[in-house]
Image (cartoon, rainbow, N blue to C red):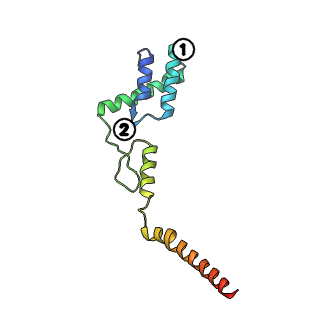
Amino acid sequence: MGLKWTFERISKLGRSSYHGIPADGGVRMMCERLAVKVTKGIPLLENDIRYLERLEKVRNEEMKKGKSKKVRMVPGTDVPYENWIQAWGITEQMKRKKIDWVNVSVWFGFIPIFSFLSWYGVYKLVIWLF
C-alpha cells in the first residue's frame, strides 16, 4: 500500500466496521493516536504502518465481498444487537418479571392488617384482664 498515510485515511479506518461489527474502542483509539502522529509530523513506525495496512486489507476484502452477513444475537433470543450495552439492556428487560398481584396484596395488604389486628387483640385482652 504505497499511498501516503493521511489524517483522513487513518481516521476512516478507525470508524469502519470489521467482520460486520463496528470497530471497538481499541481500534478507534489506536487510529486516533496514529492520526495525531501524522498531523504533528511524527513519522510512523514500521509496526504502526503494518497495523494500518492490516486494517485496510481487512476493510478492502470486506468491501469486495460486500457487507458481511454476520449478525450477533442476544443469547436465548432472536433479537439482534450491535454492542454489549444493547445486549445487556435486552437481557435485563427479559429478567424482569410481571407483577404478581397476589404477592403484592399479601405483603402490603393482609400481613399489615393481620399484624395490626393481632396486636389490637393483645391490647384488648390486656385491657380486659387488668
Q: Residue furthest top?
A: 41
Q: Residue at x 39, y 57 (%)?
A: 76
**Residue for badge 2:** 20
Q: Residue at x 43, y 48 (%)?
A: 87
Kindly indicate the quadrant of the structure image that contains residue 94.
bottom left
The picture places residue 30, in percent across and down from the top left corner, at 51, 27
Q: Residue at x 65, y 86 (%)?
A: 128
Q: Amino acid at mark 1?
A: Pro
Q: Is residue 29 above or below residue 83?
A: above
Q: Is residue 17 above or below residue 39?
A: below
Q: Earlier in the sequence, mark 1 or mark 2?
A: 2
Q: Amino acid at mark 2?
A: Gly
Q: Nearer the viewer, residue 41 or 116?
A: 116
Left or right: 33, with 70 as reference point: right
The picture places residue 65, in percent across and down from the top left corner, at 30, 34
Q: Nearer the viewer, residue 44 or 85?
A: 85
Camera sees residue 74: yes
The picture places residue 56, in percent across and down from the top left corner, at 41, 26
- Find numbered disc 1 in the image and state the secondary structure of the residue it sits on: loop
So how many labels did they put on this image?
A: 2
Task: Give the label on residue 98, or none.
Answer: none
The quarter in which the N terminus is drawn is: top left
Find out whether the residues at labels 1 and 2 contact each other: C-beta distance under 8 Å.
no
The picture places residue 23, in percent across and down from the top left corner, at 44, 33
**Residue for badge 1:** 43
Q: Residue at x 59, y 79 (%)?
A: 118
Kindly indicate the quadrant of the structure image that contains residue 115.
bottom right
Q: Nearer the viewer, residue 115 or 120?
A: 120
